[in-house]
Image (spheres, rainbow, N blue to C red):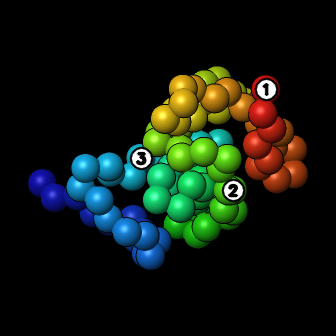
Amino acid sequence: ETLNRIWSLPLNVTWNPNNPYHCCSFIDDDWLISDYELGRLLHISKTGKINSIVPYNTIPYCATLFGTNILAVSTKDGVNLHNLNYKKTYTIFVL
């Protein structure tokens, strides 16, 4: 069998095979991409649109969602935990 593409989103990012980009499933079937090159998180909708771009204070290597409102982001300095408030928009708050 082959995989059928649902959607594709060009991100205009620099590819580094030694540091691949990481994505994780996010709230409401959306996605979160860690962009280590530009130090930001990209919130992608389930339909393949960029919902928001969040500048990150250090290089984010990998992000994952714990439960419904805790986002863990690994960086060169350790792991940061964030409380998510998503009543109207997805806003990341530092714990």
Q: Is residue 1 left or right of residue 67?
A: left
Residue 21 visible in the current orientation: yes
For the C terminus, which image quadrant? top right
Disc 1: CA contacts within 10 A as few (<14), some (14-19) or many (>=20):
few
The circle drawn on residue 54 is 2
Q: Which mark sits nearer the N-terminus, 3 or 1?
A: 3
Q: Residue at x 52, y 66 (%)?
A: 48
Amino acid type indicated by mark 2: Val
Foreground of the two, 48 or 71: 71
Amino acid type indicated by mark 1: Leu
Q: Report, in whole angstroms, how far the alpha carbon at label 3 lies from the one at label 1.
A: 22 Å
Q: Nearer the viewer, mark 3 or mark 1?
A: 1
Dot 3 corresponds to which residue? 22
Q: Report, in whole angstroms, how far the alpha carbon at label 1 lies from the one at label 2.
A: 16 Å
Q: Is residue 67 left or right of residue 91?
A: left
Dot 1 corresponds to which residue? 95
Which quadrant of the structure image shows residue 4?
A: bottom left
Report helix, strand or loop for mark 2: strand
- x, y (%) of residue 56? 65, 50
